[in-house]
Amino acid sequence: MQFSGNIRSVRDLARNVEVGKPTPNEKATDRKNQQPLLPEDEGQSFRSLTARIGESDFAAVKRAVERFHATLNDAFLAAYARIIARKRGEPISVVTLPCPADLRRFASDSFPIAADDALTLANMTGMYTLVVEVANGDSFDRTLSLVHDEMRLQKERHRCFAGVSALHAISPWMPAPLLDWLGHTIYSILPISYTNFGIIDAERFAFEGCAVERCYLTGTYRPAPAFQMAVSTFADTCTLNASAVGSQDHFARCQDILDAVKRELLDWSSKA
């Protein structure tokens, strides 16, 4: 099957976006030396687990985020990082989380982006690497402030383009198998990860004669001990998701993390 009008390239984007130096937090952490949050598990069952934040509760979270002058993504990351730190049980925990960035949202005169209503199938993803320190007794506001400041700095420096620009620079003379290996190395999956799929348009996501009441997007099924939290919003309802491979015990641990992140967000928003 062929699709017309869907050719996408990062060539002009990679050439025209200046990538700044790593932030101090990025420099201070070893991205490759990350320990899993969950134990090993030999189960082979598949399960997609969810924790839903209903319309009224999610509206409260959004109001709290607006008062804090942060973003919803900042709040999701802060809540997730705090639960990871709590599960580790250390006095001070340095949490590292990959934070995907949709490169299609970047535009310049030399890199026109398709109109918002255009269909696109291209997966153009860059990656921020959030590093945040969470100490026992830290308030949610403090963690959120640290996350917000780090993400702001990384966005100002266009750090999500670091791997893309490097691959683009060497791609003309690098053999394809080696380039493939480098791509997987740069974008290697950490044992604890995160992705935000954003908003699913409830008006445009429709089937004739069928009313869609609930919808969420999932990440790849991650075998234990790996864990990924995915976030998506549909019809003003936010869904936290973990797609896992393991046993019933593993699924229970994954569900516990999702429920804890949800409680962290609701507790904060009720007091903010």
Image: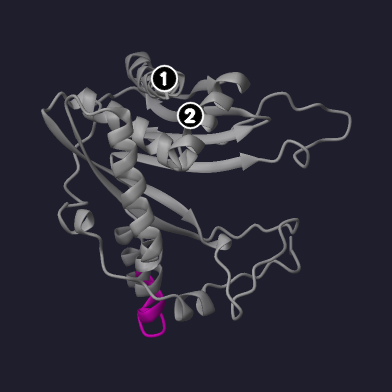
Pinpoint residue 231: horizontal percent, then vertical percent. 50, 35
Pinpoint residue 208: horizontal percent, then vertical percent. 87, 34
Between discs 1 and 2, the one toward the N terminus: 2
Q: Callout 2 environment at 10 Å: few (<14), some (14 to 19), or many (20+)?
A: many
Instruction: Give the position of the C terminus as an image quadrant.
Output: top left
Which residue: 19% across, 24% down? Answer: 137
Which residue: 65% across, 57% down? Answer: 121
Q: How many marks?
A: 2
Query: Where is residue 249, by image quadrant?
Result: top left
Name the residue tied to disc 1. Answer: 271
Residue 225 seen anywhere in this rendered image of the structure = no
Name the residue tied to disc 2. Answer: 241
Pinpoint residue 111: horizontal percent, then vertical percent. 59, 76
In the displayed structure image, the side of residue 20 where residue 210 appears, left or right: right
Number of the label disc, if any, that sits on residue 71: none
Judge whether residue 115 is colored magenta.
Answer: no
Residue 190 seen anywhere in this rendered image of the structure = yes
